[in-house]
Amino acid sequence: MASANTSWSEENFSCSICLDVFNNPVTTACGHNFCRTCITKFWDEQVKYKCPVCVKVFDTKPDLQVNLLLSDMASQFRTSVRVKDQPCGEPADVPCDFCTGTQLKAVKSCLVCLISYCQTHLEPHQRIAGLKKHRLVEPMDRLEDRMCKIHNQLLELFCKTDQVCVCQSCTETDHKSHPVVPLKEEYEVKTAQLGKIEADVPQMIQERKLRIKKLKDTVEMSKKVADRELADGVQVHTALIGCVEKCRDEFNQTVIERLKSTVKRAEDLIKELEQEIGDLTKISSEVMPLSQTTDHLCFLRAFRSLKDPPPTRDWTTVEVLPPSYVGTLRRSLDQLEETLNMEMKKLSDAELKRVQQYEVDVTLDPDTAYPRLTLSEDGKQAKIGSAAKELPDNPKRFTEYTYVLTRQSFSSGRFYFEVQVKDNNNWCLGVARESINRKGKITVKPVKSYWILYYNYKGLFVNPSVRLPLRAKLQKVGVFVDYDEGLVSFYDVKARVHIYSATGCSFTEPLYPFLGGHSASLIISPVNQTD
């Protein structure tokens, strides 16, 4: 501590209780001086009133008087000394724990007292013998947190094994065999890591914001697609309902008209019969009295005046049969089916155009091809030969069946590809899981991880051996997969109609497009929406 411009010793201006320069000094009856606050607090904690220096006991609490001369000199001395102290101005400055009012910048921290001192309050540690033994270090904030709770020593080292700060004594006990480094060295390492994090985090945040935007855009687009799909569905179903109602009305009208015709014919015949009955009844009324006459002359005269009976129909061949409705309902449903087929054709064409947008470029993998298969240089065509080629053993290669996978696999999303099967009488295609068996006998069923369409002399099938109707021989087949929805669909590209869909599939690993069969050749062809 620097001395003031006075011949007096610095000790003459220090309170023996707080060891600081006097603040509002007062004098006791025994002639010793203290800060008013210090002596008052000291006496409040004692049973007897005594002097802290000479231990003189006072019968009553002394009436303390301000030492004006000492107060003035202490004030001058304090001002002279503190011109070297600096107030805290920077965030990194450690404030003095002893200062009241404006806190000055600490110049040292004591590891024994666990207090930081400015130049003025550090003076006792430079003067008093007992305090001189305390370990002083560069100013540190929150000293209690920087001390080892076990050894009460400064945490100066870093244990790389446990990733904790330790003191020197810790390295001789719990962390004895652990690698340790100075805090500064580990600080530099962690600072470098932090710098990388600081550089990476904004980019990560930006990427996630873009992902959020993309998801929101997807939701918005999904809503628009759903609205459009609902509108199309309402239009199609309304049209179909109208068609059904029209067919129903026409069917009802046909039945009713036939019934009316039968009823009218029967009513006309009944009317004719009733007319004949009336005529015959009239004749009968004339004949009956004559038949009872026994006078020959009267009978002959009366008989001559009788009229001949009117001509009547031969009713033995006349009949009215109930109307026949055989085929009426079937023809009505045939008309409805024709309309439905037309609508299905339109929907299938629109559906095919939609899935064709997910076209992927795939090429056949020679490492998986059965030895009798020859692949084109561009990897788009597989052609079967008469003899097997000598090929290196490869765990991915099929050894018993003429199958081949593509190089590309898919683990999410949607994809579509087309295969030309024209002029081939035995083929199969679809998708297969990565873990399928490539060696020995293979059963191409869904439970065995295949989803395929295959054709032979018996007809068109999907696994497991479900036969499908085939209107015409297929020329090009489209395969669409929605991995997340568990959907595999097949399309007749030439006719632009849907063939079959496998739904509710469980995909848990990569899927590979798959070709095979005993055909001349199969070709992966580019998508042409005008086919």
Image: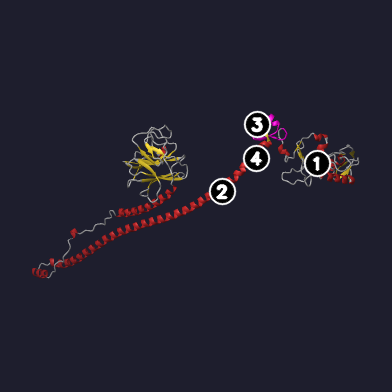
Is label 2 in a helix, a strand or a loop? Answer: helix
Nearer to us: label 3 or label 1: 3
Crowd band around label 3 with a 10 angstrom C-alpha radius: few (<14), some (14–19), many (20+) = few
Q: What crowding class fits label 1: few (fewer than 14 Cα within 10 Å), some (14-19), or many (20 or more)?
A: many
Which residue in the protein does label 4 denote? Answer: 191
Q: Residue at x 62, y 44 (%)?
A: 198
Disc 1 marks which residue?
121
Circle nearer the N terminus (1, 4): 1
Q: CA distance from mark 3 to mark 1?
A: 39 Å
Q: Nearer the viewer, mark 4 or mark 2?
A: 4
Q: Magenta stretch: residue 499 in it?
A: no
Q: Amino acid at mark 3?
A: Pro
- Earlier in the chain: of badge 3 and badge 1, it is 1
172 falls in the magenta region = yes
- What x and y, as percent, mark residue 334? 32, 53
Q: Which mark is residue 179?
A: 3
Asked whether, in this view, residue 86 is left or right of residue 27, the answer is: left
Observer-nearest residue: 86 or 274?
Answer: 86
Label 2, label 3: how far apart the Cα atoms are: 42 Å
Q: Which residues are magenta?
A: 151-173
